[in-house]
Amino acid sequence: MAIEIVVGDKEIEATKLPPDSLGLSPIPETPENIKIILKGFFFTIKLNARKTMDGNIIIYDHPTIDIVIVPSKNKIISMPKKNYYHDTFSAQKRYSDFLENRGAIVLGSTRGGIVYNSLESYYPVNADLDVLQVILLLTKKFLEQELEQYRPEEEYQEEVEEMYVNPDDADSTEYGEVPQARKKGSIDPNYKPYNLLYRF
């Protein structure tokens, strides 16, 4: 699902990023007899995101963590994906540091959340600009940088899987090429580790 927002000049300045790096779309040309005065930029953010019934936004683009934005409490929560058992604290810390370095969250508000292994932060209220738009812009930029780091790992996993599924001639043998024998390999399947003998 794509999230489309109209971002003003103040929100762009609040990200502390050059407008060119955000991929801003140019304003379309209009016929001569129609005059439209537009301020700011039109910017389309494409995220794999869902909006919950209570108004929260859950972003699923990151390979290891999910990001939940809670506008009613000005809170951002990052948590490991379901069925992902590796340590995700480093990715969560990178995200909170990314927002904190750009002044998008309250300094010192990052802490462990009520959900197991979650990290939460609070973003400030600002009457002059839409802080939620700034958070979405910065989150999109962070995800772009993260996906570049995870791409070599994903490519390696695809290569390993391809090697297992379709091995080369040098790494495979035809059926019957290796003769059968009563005992194969160097590990005896009947061998029991010494310390396990006395557990039962």
Image (cartoon, rainbow, N blue to C red):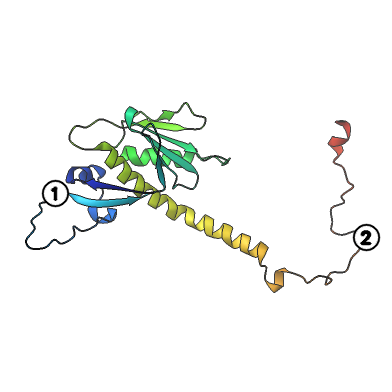
Q: Earlier in the sequence, mark 1 or mark 2?
A: 1
Please, which residue is most extreme toward the right here? 182
The residue where tag 1 is placed is: 39
The residue depicted at 31 percent of the width and 34 percent of the height is 105
Residue 164's spot in the image, x, y percent? 67, 62
Q: Amino acid at mark 2?
A: Arg
Residue 32 visible, this angle: yes
The residue where tag 2 is placed is: 182
Counting every numbered tag in the picture gives 2
Asked if residue 116 is positioned above or below residue 169 in the image, the reply reads: above
Residue 47's spot in the image, x, y percent? 38, 49
Secondary element at tag 2: loop
The residue depicted at 26 percent of the width and 37 percent of the height is 131
| Figure quadrant of residue 175 | bottom right
In the picture, which quadrant includes the C terminus? top right
Q: Amino acid at mark 1?
A: Lys
The residue depicted at 13 percent of the width and 61 percent of the height is 30
